[in-house]
Amino acid sequence: MQNAGIADLALNWRYLAFDVPPEKLRAALDGAKVMGFVGLNLTVPHKLLALEMLDVLDESAQIWGAVNTVRFEARDAQGAWRPVREFDSIPQQIRSHGFNTDADAITRAIREEVGMELSGAKVLVLGAGGAGRTAALKLASEKPREIFLVNRTVGKAEAVAGEIASRHPGLRAQVGYPPGQVDLVVNATSVGLKPEDGLPFDESQFRLSRANAVYDMIYRPAETALLKTAKSAGCRIANGLGMLLYQGAKALELWSGRPAPLEVMRRSLEKNIYG
Ligand code: ATR
């Protein structure tokens, strides 16, 4: 996805994957600075570990408490911080600037791919791990009418409900299954990744005939048991590919300073993931 986007923007860059053990993250970030990297992405568990290692954190990284995108920057002749891509040679003093492009990608994907307006919606979030927490907090920031949180380990859902209550005092965030109809169900659990996985919720407590739309953050397989069942129940559905696309597109925009070629990147993702 990134290399397709980079090629389309005619940038002389390459996006490469490096397997870095958590205890070497600091050394890897220092190495990237020295080698003149434009930026990088971080994945689990580095998204949290990097919070303490980066020189500055954008508001997005502070709000969501995780960093998935880093841009390297240096001072120009006037002393202003500029992305290193704007310098002809690798500057002496480089700082790392951390961003989070994951959270916005969740709501953008839901809006654009499920066609759902989140303000005023009644939402059920399944899962309260890293992805579930960010999804629930981000959805809560979109002024939904009510938000329900369900997780196998109830204490984790309660902790997220507590965070929502302190950030959005007027919002009703409840732990447990919703009564009646819901506008949107979001799966942020890992249930569905394995072929033998069933539904990520208890069917004796909730039925998909009570949901208008279902968003599954899983993108491989393209259609989980949840999405299959939701489709037969007449729900609008989308998988997590859009989230992956939008977080990557935003990262490329932060690095390049230009609009990301979304359709080129989407086609590349689809080809690489689904063949
Ligand atoms: P991520 O960063 O992808 O969110 P995670 O923090 O490990 O990963 O969270 C995985 C989520 O899937 C959690 O909500 C987890 O529930 P617990 O908090 O109870 O562990 C959920 N999950 C994983 N396996 C599950 C299973 N077999 N049944 C129900 N929920 C499951």
Image (cartoon, rainbow, N blue to C red):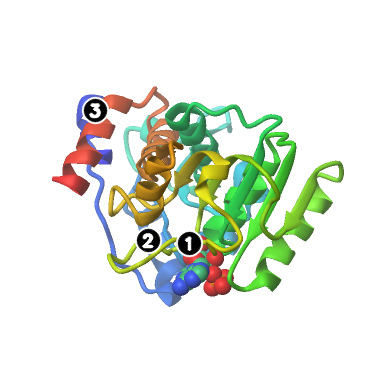
Task: Determine contact: label 1, label 2, CB under 8 Å.
Answer: yes
Dot 2 corresponds to which residue?
192
Comes first in the chain, label 1 or label 2: 2
Note whether 253 is above or below 47 in the view shown.
above
- Identify the residue shown where x is 58% and y is 71%: 152
**Is 130 placed above or below 112 here?**
below
Categorize mark 1 by other alpha carbons within 10 Å: few (<14), some (14-19), many (20+): some
Mark whose residue sits in front, 3 or 1? 1
Label 3 is placed on what type of residue? Val
Asked if the residues shown at circle 2 and circle 3 are in contact, with their CB atoms under 8 angstroms apart, the answer is: no
Q: Locate the N terminus by quadrant.
A: top left
The residue tagged 1 is 200
**Residue that protrudes farthest toward the bottom in the picture:** 23
Percent position of residue 103, x then y: 55, 44
Q: Which residue is mark 3?
A: 264
The mark that comes first in sequence, 3 or 1, is 1
Q: Is residue 248 left or right of residue 117?
A: left
Q: Number of numbered discs present? A: 3
